[in-house]
């Protein structure tokens, strides 16, 4: 069995039966949440997303736990966890960020991780990547203000963000149960649509 690569397709040629199988490689999405909380609503959104991802895509989740506070003195000898995070971002086709809202903005945990992965100056791991964002809060605005601050950061990172649908989950404590399951069908539909749009957008950017 020989294995060749033509554009983005894996081609398996079986010389015994003369059949050529053409398989499209899945779009790999890396998801991370700006919360370290075990019962985080935003982690729950990522969990729901992993069930709703389109068939031709796969969602991998990265936990920001153990990413230390940013220190520019360490840019040329990055902590191991930051190296792992940067490598993961580089390896995937697209990103999915679930952000809580802290004091009308993104939590320090998320901004800290983003700052690390954007450095050093000439090695921004996010450069040119497609990205979708979601937010959840028990409050009535669902983290909308944090989303708009995050969008501004994405411009700085030169990322290509999906605009619609806006997945802003207000009253998250009523939609996500104590086991972290998102039961609310309207929200699930929006997340499914967001992921479909992200996959389509990624394919366009990669000319698939
Ligand atoms: C420091 C801090 C600031 C907060 N500020 C906001 C806020 O501005 N808007 C909001 O909707 N919720 C705010 N909250 C409540 C969070 O939405 C809530 O803790 C939420 O559960 C955090 O997301 P998580 O469940 O993914 O950890 C704040 C919480 C903390 C700890």
Image (cartoon, helix red, strand yellow):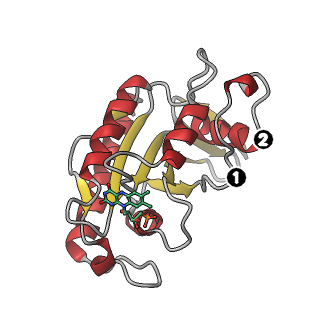
**Residue 119 higher or lower than 49, as above or below:** above
| Mark 1–mark 2 distance (CA, rounded to whole Å) | 10 Å
Q: How many marks?
A: 2
- Numbered label attached to residue 86: none
Residue receiving disc 2: 80
For ligand 1, tell me if the residue under mark 1 lies within 8 Å.
no
Disc 2 is placed on an element classified as helix
- Of tags 1 and 2, which is closer to the observer? 1
Instruction: Residue at 75% x, 27% y: name it.
Output: 74
Query: Which residue was labeled with disc 1?
Result: 66
Q: Residues within 10 Å of mark 2 (few under 14, many from 20)?
A: few
In the rendered structure, the answer to whether residue 55 lies left or right of residue 8 reads left
51 horizontally vs 62: left or right = left
Q: Between residues 51 and 69, which one lies in front from this camera angle?
A: 69
Res. 53 image quadrant: bottom left
Q: Residues within 10 Å of mark 1 (few under 14, many from 20)?
A: few
Mark 2 vs ligand 1: CB under 8 Å?
A: no
In which quadrant is the C terminus drawn? top left
Element on which disc 1 rests: loop
Pick whichever of labels 1 and 2 is earlier in the sequence: 1
Residue 185 lies, in percent from the top left, at 23, 76
Residue 193 location, quadrant: bottom left
**Quadrant field for ligand 1:** bottom left
With 116 as the anchor, is 146 left or right in this view? left
Q: Position of residue 140 (x, y in %)?
A: 20, 65
Q: At 35% across and 26% down in the image, what residue appears?
A: 155
Judged from this view, the residue extending furthest toward the front is 103
Seen at 46% across and 44% down, the residue is: 95
Instruction: State the residue in front, 78 or 109.
Output: 109
Residue at (26% x, 66% y) in the render: 139
Image coordinates for residue 67, horizontal then vertical, percent: 67, 47
């Amino acid at each position: 069995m020989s294995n060749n690569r033509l554009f983005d397709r894996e081609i398996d040629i079986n010389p015994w039966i003369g059949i050529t199988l053409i398989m499209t490689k899945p779009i790999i999405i890396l998801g991370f949440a700006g919360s370290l909380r075990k019962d985080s609503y935003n982690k729950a959104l990522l969990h729901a997303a992993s069930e709703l991802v389109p068939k031709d895509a796969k969602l991998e989740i990265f936990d920001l736990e153990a990413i230390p506070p940013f220190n520019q003195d360490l840019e040329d000898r990055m902590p191991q966890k930051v190296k792992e995070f940067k490598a993961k971002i580089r390896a995937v086709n697209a990103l999915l960020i679930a952000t809580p809202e802290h004091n009308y903005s993104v939590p320090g945990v998320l901004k800290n991780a983003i700052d690390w992965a954007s450095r050093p100056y000439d090695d921004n791991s996010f450069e040119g990547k497609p990205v979708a964002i979601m937010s959840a809060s028990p409050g009535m605005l669902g983290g909308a203000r944090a989303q708009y601050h995050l969008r501004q950061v994405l411009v700085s990172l030169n990322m290509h963000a999906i605009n619609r649908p806006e997945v802003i989950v207000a009253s998250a404590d009523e939609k996500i149960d104590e086991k972290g399951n998102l039961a609310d069908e309207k929200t699930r539909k929006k997340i499914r649509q967001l992921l479909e749009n992200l996959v389509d957008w990624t394919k366009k950017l990669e000319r698939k």
